[in-house]
Amino acid sequence: RGTFYIVATPIGNLDDISERAKKVLANADFIAAEDTRHSKRLLNHFAIDTKLFALHDHNERDKASYIASLLNDGKNVALISDAGTPLISDPGYHVVNFLRQEAHNIVPVPGPSALITALCASGLPTDRFSFVGFLPAKSKSRRDEMSSWLPSLGTVVFYESTHRILDCLADLEVVWGESVQVALARELTKTFETFLSGSVSDIKQILEDDSNQTRGEFVMMVSLPEDEKDNSEALKILKILLKELP
Ligand code: SAM
């Protein structure tokens, strides 16, 4: 049987592709990509002309059995996403879950992920952290999610988009107070890579004063205050009040 490779690709700087990733992608029979047009450009850059097919959130359940049949025919299939590590806030989970159940060979080829790239340089605690993906788009649900976090999660890490970054900081300030510590990583590995760290109100001020700081891709990291444990009663009341807000 063939092998299913999960291959990480750069999150901005193309030099971050690994030698092994290039070899695996060049030698695979097929590459399953989130957006084939986008991936074609990346593969052209590395002169890789392996056949591509699309695997995205809407078709991955159907594609799982197709991929299994390719593997049964002895073909090797590599999965990539638009950027970074597949399955990390990207498609692929249903395929990997299905292939594991059918005892296929699955080989990860590690490389960049915005999550780890941001966290390691943030200055916030790294001994324990929780990755919560993308937060809900609506403010009410986002505040509910934020108020469910506990200090035992360690540093809370999430992905955020340019459109919502200011609203998200405003919600964080309401739920966790203006002094909660935040690190914001922007445009990692790219020309305008920036790290900002400080209290949520300071970071919000910096973004309000300079709209350039709201552009691009973001990873947000929050260090929840330890002493909230002593304020658990106050937190419970706050949660109840937040639920009532429009
Ligand atoms: N699978 C990817 C990974 O391993 O990082 C993440 C895919 S997710 C759909 C895309 C989000 O990751 C972006 O909206 C942004 O929050 C974050 N991201 C990706 N590349 C980034 C970069 N170069 N700088 C900062 N954040 C980035």
Image (spheres, helix red, strand yellow):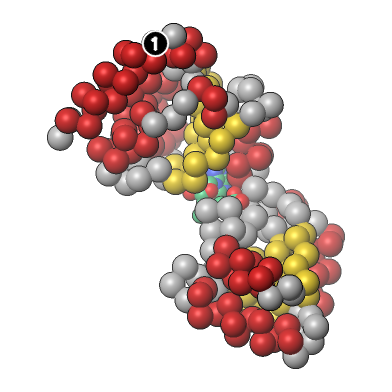
- Could you tell me which residue is drawn at 47 percent across and 26 percent down? 150
Check disc 1: other Cα within 10 Å, few if <14, some if 14-19, many if 20+: few
Q: Is residue 166 above or below residue 160?
A: above
Please, what secondary structure does the residue beneath circle 1 have?
loop
Q: Is residue 127 above or below residue 24?
A: above
- Could you tell me which residue is drawn at 60 percent across and 32 percent down? 129
- Could you tell me which residue is drawn at 39 percent across and 11 percent down? 231
From the viewer's perspective, is 159 left or right of 167? Answer: right
Q: Nearer the viewer, residue 44 or 11?
A: 11
Q: State which quadrant residue 238 falls in.
A: top left
Q: Nearer the viewer, residue 245 or 83?
A: 245
Q: State which quadrant residue 177 falls in.
A: top left
From the viewer's perspective, is 62 left or right of 188? Answer: left
Q: Quadrant of the N terminus?
A: bottom right
Q: State which quadrant residue 46 falls in.
A: bottom right
- Could you tell me which residue is drawn at 69 percent across and 49 percent down? 112
Q: Nearer the viewer, residue 198 or 62?
A: 62
Q: Quadrant of the C terminus?
A: top left
- Three-letter code, disc 1: Asn
In the picture of the structure, the residue carrying the numbered disc 1 is 231
Q: Is residue 34 above or below residue 136?
A: below
Point out the residue furthest to the bottom here: 73
